[in-house]
Amino acid sequence: MTSWMQVKVKGLTGSLEVEPLGQNAESLAYVYAINLAKPLPKGEYLTILVDTIQLHASYPKPAYASQTDSHFRVYEADGLLLSPYETTSQRLRFKAPTPSIRSYHISHTLEDLAKEEPVVKSGATVTFGPFKSQPPTATKGFNRTPYRVSVDFEMNIPSLTVVSLNRSVEVSHWGANMNTQDDYMLRNDAPELKGQFSRLDFQMAQHARRMSPVIISAVTLQLPSGAQNPYYFDLVGNVSTSAFRPAAKPSSERAARLGPQNAQLDLKPRYPLMGGWNYTFTVGWDAPLGDSAHWDEKNGRWILAVPFMTPLPSTPVDKAEVRVILPEGATDITVHPPFDVSLMERSTHITYLDTIGRPAFTFHAENLTEVHDGLIYITYKVPLAAHLQKPLAVGIASLIVFSVMWTLKRVDMTIHK
């Protein structure tokens, strides 16, 4: 599944415009159109670099393993480039995390097309091809099944997936604070655990520093530099096995030498996350509003920049829902997400001491990676009356309570005979 695509001309900076055209009815291929900056004259050449990120492109093999077994995965792909054009020469190069590759396979049909040695392994890299003079493959009559390649390789890094991420960001001008809360559902995509989990074996491997890298015992989040008052809990309650490392103060010598740094939150789940296991938890923190919002005096508007998510390293996000709650009374609102989202909704959020509620925007997106860690830009106005609305509501409520208590105190509740 293609999560992200970027197209560039080799040797030039900047990206080309990519227009998704949808699935072709005849070839069943998903088609993209790349718009060049200027037409390419006849007879001239142009090298185009297409970078994509594919999610869930491999699967564990075997599907079940004990907690001490190594983790192997299989990558399968089309050996021929899916293209509406004739291809003079092409090759497929696969680079594994380690040189530990158990096997690789090329179909006989594809092997016959190779003019030289069809497969070459060098260290952690397996190269298929080159394959010469191929007709268009994005056609209805082309059968992609016989032209497959596969690599069975060892995975020595965690295979995590964020099944769902729900982020809630609440902006408060009265408190000069921005609160962020993330609800995670995390899954370990390593082979599912075969048999029962042994705490003894786990602790022995941990003590001897021989623990399998696919067993997740800790997760690290990089928080904004101004993050403070972090909290971490799961379905059971508060989890105390965490460590917060605030960012170095700007005035310190280390901060001046290294530049802006992130705060770091190290999380240790209640139990090690084995293959096939899930873990649901919540993290949150406060940050000074001045780190994310500033006043545009020229236009008389607030400009707010909210991170779409806090990504885990090399961890895709299947589904994300981000909700930004603005101050009560915010008007003339414009919203600019960092990329095209699946759905954007506007609603009203009501909390303590609110009268009319706060405008809230919810963004839905799927199949995200670290490259989607952009900023949501929101501009808005907060009239003076809106700033006075909350203390006025508190004052009126206090006056009503005081009046009721004063009236009740003046009433004679004694019983006369």
Image (spheres, rainbow, N blue to C red):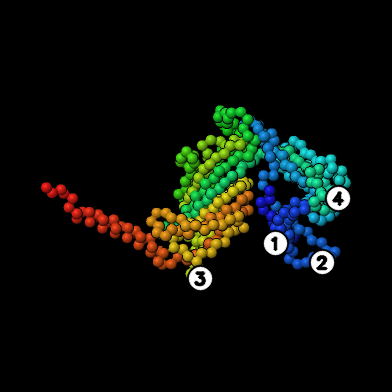
Q: Would you say the residues marked 4 and 1 are in contact, meaning their CB atoms lie under 8 Å apart?
A: no
Q: In this figure, which residue is indicated by the disc labeled 2?
A: 41
Q: Would you say the residues marked 1 and 2 are in contact, meaning their CB atoms lie under 8 Å apart?
A: no
Name the residue at 54% across, 45% down.
Answer: 184
Q: Which mark sits nearer the N-terminus, 3 or 2?
A: 2
Gap between marks 4 and 2, in whole Å? Answer: 25 Å
Gap between marks 4 and 1, in whole Å? Answer: 29 Å
Mark 4, secondary structure of its residue? strand
Q: Is residue 88 left or right of residue 239?
A: right
Mark 1, secondary structure of its residue? strand
Q: In this figure, which residue is indicated by the disc labeled 1?
A: 17
Q: In this figure, which residue is indicated by the disc labeled 4?
A: 132
Residue 375, x across and y down, in percent = 57, 58
Tell me the crowding category of disc 2: few under 14, some 14 to 19, or many 20 or more residues within 10 angstroms, Cα based. few
- Identity of the amino acid at label 2? Pro
Q: Would you say the residues marked 3 and 1 are in contact, meaning their CB atoms lie under 8 Å apart?
A: no
- Identity of the amino acid at label 1? Glu
Q: In this figure, which residue is indicated by the disc labeled 3?
A: 299
Tell me the crowding category of disc 1: few under 14, some 14 to 19, or many 20 or more residues within 10 angstroms, Cα based. some
